[in-house]
Image (spheres, helix red, strand yellow):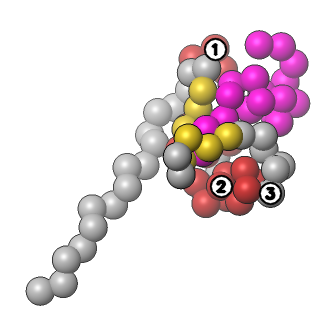
């Protein structure tokens, strides 16, 4: 019998305000805010379009960098 892996959780949180964003966002949270796929976000992080950093093998994006990418000043 072939073993299958459980699917990765999909972020379902809908942010009604950018003030609700955590100081450091995970890939799923960034994807949710931008309404793009997690794979697309990882591609943009890898090529440097979205500034981020890795913790182990997982990407993180600071709230400030995400807002800057979105063209929003402040915070």
State whether residue 4 appears in this view.
yes
> Which of these two is toward me, 75 or 48?
48
Percent of width and height locating residue 51: 78, 40
Q: Give the residues drawn in magenta, as a range.
A: 59-75
- The residue beneath circle 1 is 19
What is the spatial separation of the Cα atoms under label 1 and label 2, in whole angstroms? 23 Å
What is the spatial separation of the Cα atoms under label 1 and label 3, in whole angstroms? 27 Å
Q: Residue at 56% across / 21% down in the picture?
A: 22
Q: Residue at 82% across / 50% down in the picture?
A: 48
Q: Mark 1 or mark 2, which is nearer to you?
A: 2
Percent of width and height locating residue 19: 64, 14
- Vertical placement of 10 versus 75: above or below? below
- Vertical placement of 48 versus 43: above or below? above
Pick out the residue farthest to the bottom: 1
Percent of width and height locating residue 23: 61, 20
State whether residue 27 appears in this view.
no
For mark 3, give the secondary structure.
loop
> Which of these two is toward me, 27 or 54?
54
Using the image, tell me which numbered label, if any, was put on residue 47.
Answer: 3
For mark 1, give the secondary structure.
helix
Q: Mark 1 or mark 3, which is nearer to you?
A: 3
Q: For the N terminus, which image quadrant? A: bottom left
Density class for disc 2 (Cα within 10 Å; few <14, some 14-19, many ≥20) is many
- Vertical placement of 37 versus 18: above or below? below
- The residue beneath circle 2 is 42
């Amino acid at each position: 019998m072939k073993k299958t892996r459980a699917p990765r959780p999909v972020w379902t949180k809908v942010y009604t305000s950018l003030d609700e964003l955590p100081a450091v966002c995970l890939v799923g949270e960034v994807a949710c805010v931008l309404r793009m796929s997690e794979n697309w976000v990882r591609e943009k992080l890898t090529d440097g379009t979205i500034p981020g950093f890795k913790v182990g093998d997982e990407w993180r994006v600071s709230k400030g960098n995400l807002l800057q990418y979105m063209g929003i000043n402040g915070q």
